[in-house]
Image (cartoon, helix red, strand yellow):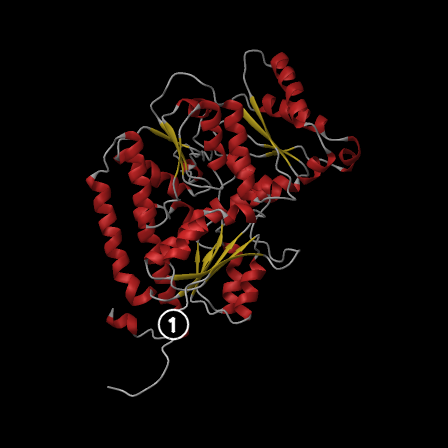
């Protein structure tokens, strides 16, 4: 027995800190503005053209982002304000815009009227203008109904995440109508790619659950048909939104993107609200499927049990040998970041830095997922809210050791300069092909994401000649 009198160091409990961005100004922004998110929600509806009340750039640059991400074009209109509107107001431009859209698009049924920083500062009366527009539409197009939804999204607060939530809530508030029970389940996944929407619809179909996904963006991955037409539009219809008030319940998969809408349906139409964590990884997907089964009484089919087993086997092949104790930084939407952090811990990755945007520090403090991360982690985690990409770059320069970065394409130069491998997730991802059609959610998404992480690490090992010989023996 040794006579050593060395003291045994006590294990320090893991620390999970939630801190704001250190500076007043933003350097290398991580998020886009509220009107960008509102436009994304609007284009998810069939026969809908969002009308952005502001300068032309508020539409042009957002459409460019959508085109970069999806490699498709989308119809978004602008009131195209100029200097005179800053003095005299711009509501006449809204009236003109609504009438022009109604004349040019005979199938148009919904126009979200999306404000911007300039028109919110001017103080244009959007609700009053909508009443004038409705009278003008009734006179010019008798028997035709076009829903006008006011969407207040000043760019000087919030982000595209809160803008998406605001537009979703406004369209449901404007269109939803109490009627006969439909027996359907509302499913609100939040801001996700078509690949995730298709995966959710596949899971619901396998469970034989009659459900409506809001917004159904499957056709954002639009086919090139024999007739040489390319149809890129949302699949969610006006009737779908109307009947959201008559569903058996609303499954909210995104606290910050769909939670306000499902609460509205619960408060105004007594549609039960069932919030669950965004289904990234195995445990969150398990919880979602159990909740769907509980709501509908439908069993989880053997096909999904098998898919789960295949995913577990794939994750087990990678976790301990290649992922264990590797440090990860994740940035993007809060629902995405918190979900991916939990997934990383499932496969033995250590998400040591989480960067989320928005000025919602008080809301984040109450997010139960932070407490769950703290309870599960045996390493320190720093969560920066209202963050920008300078926060990521600064921490790396100050010595934060990272093995992997996960986030959208705007962070690519931070990863390149620091020589850290990066996996693209979130919005926008424009420097890798076809990511919008690949699922990140569910068992299949967990497996594909883990394999993408592994292959990214493998390529980096080869490029840097860092223990690449391991791949010969795997």
Is 353 left or right of 387, judged from the image as shown? left
Q: Is residue 426 above or below residue 11?
A: above
Residue indicated by mark 1: 10
- Could you tell me how many numbered marks the image carries? 1
Inspect this view and state whether residue 108 appears: no
Question: Image quadrant for the C terminus?
Answer: bottom left
Question: Image quadrant for the N terminus?
Answer: bottom left
Q: Position of residue 18 (x, y in %)?
A: 52, 56
Is 338 left or right of 83, judged from the image as shown? left
Q: Position of residue 345 (x, y in %)?
A: 36, 58
Inspect this view and state whether residue 189 appears: yes
In percent of the image, x 29 and y 73: which residue is there?
Answer: 470
Is 438 left or right of 260, judged from the image as shown? left
Q: 10 Å neighbourhood of mark 1: few (<14), some, or many (≥20)?
A: few
**44, 191: nearer the viewer:** 191
Instruction: Answer with the quarter of the image where residue 202 lies.
Output: top left
In percent of the image, x 29 and y 88: which residue is there?
Answer: 3
In percent of the image, x 33 and y 66: which residue is there?
Answer: 324
Is disc 1 placed on a helix, strand or loop?
Answer: loop
In percent of the image, x 38 and y 29: which residue is there?
Answer: 249
Q: Position of residue 456 (x, y in %)?
A: 38, 62
Q: Is residue 372 above or below residue 304?
A: below
**255, 438: nearer the viewer:** 255
**266, 67: nearer the viewer:** 266
Q: Position of residue 420 (x, y in %)?
A: 46, 67
């Amino acid at each position: 027995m040794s006579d050593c009198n060395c003291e045994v160091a006590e294990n320090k409990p893991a620390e999970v800190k939630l801190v704001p961005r250190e500076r007043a100004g933003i350097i290398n922004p991580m998020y886009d503005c509220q009107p960008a998110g509102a436009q994304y929600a609007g284009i998810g509806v069939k026969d809908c053209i969002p009308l952005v009340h502001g300068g032309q750039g508020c539409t042009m640059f957002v459409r460019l982002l959508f085109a970069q991400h999806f490699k498709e074009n989308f119809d978004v209109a602008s009131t195209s304000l100029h200097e005179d509107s800053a003095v005299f107001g711009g509501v006449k431009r809204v009236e003109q815009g609504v009438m022009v859209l109604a004349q040019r698009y005979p199938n148009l049924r919904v126009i979200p009227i999306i404000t911007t920083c300039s028109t919110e500062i001017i103080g244009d009366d959007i609700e009053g203008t909508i009443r004038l527009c409705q009278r003008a539409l009734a006179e010019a197009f008798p028997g035709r109904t076009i829903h006008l939804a006011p969407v207040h999204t000043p760019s000087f607060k919030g982000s595209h995440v809160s803008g998406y939530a605001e537009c979703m809530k406004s369209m449901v508030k404007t269109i939803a109508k109490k009627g006969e029970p439909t027996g359907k389940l509302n499913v609100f996944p939040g801001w996700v790619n078509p690949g995730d929407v298709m995966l959710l619809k596949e899971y619901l179909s396998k469970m034989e659950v009659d459900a409506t996904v809001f917004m159904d963006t499957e056709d954002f991955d639009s086919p090139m048909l024999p007739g040489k037409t390319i149809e890129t539009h949302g699949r969610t219809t006006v009737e779908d939104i109307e009947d959201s008030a008559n569903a058996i319940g609303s499954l909210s998969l995104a606290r910050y993107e769909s939670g306000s809408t499902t609460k509205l349906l619960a408060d105004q139409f007594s549609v039960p609200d069932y919030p669950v964590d965004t289904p990234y990884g195995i445990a969150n997907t398990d919880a979602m499927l159990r909740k769907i089964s509980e709501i509908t009484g439908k069993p989880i089919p053997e096909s999904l049990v098998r898919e789960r087993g295949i995913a577990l086997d794939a994750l087990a092949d990678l976790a301990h040998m290649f992922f264990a104790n590797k440090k990860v930084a994740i940035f993007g939407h809060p629902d995405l970041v918190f979900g991916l952090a939990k997934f990383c811990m499932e496969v033995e990755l250590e998400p040591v830095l989480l960067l989320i945007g928005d000025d919602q520090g008080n809301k984040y403090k109450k997010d139960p997922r932070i407490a769950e991360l703290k309870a599960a982690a045996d390493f320190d985690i720093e969560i920066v809210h209202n963050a920008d990409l300078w926060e990521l770059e600064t921490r790396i320069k100050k010595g934060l050791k990272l093995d992997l970065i996960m986030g959208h394409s705007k962070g690519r130069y931070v990863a390149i300069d620091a020589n850290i491998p990066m996996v693209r997730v979130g919005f926008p991802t424009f420097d890798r092909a076809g990511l919008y059609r690949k699922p990140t959610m569910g068992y299949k998404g967990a497996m594909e994401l883990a394999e993408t992480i592994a292959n990214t690490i493998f390529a980096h090992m080869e490029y840097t000649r860092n223990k690449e010989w391991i791949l010969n023996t795997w």
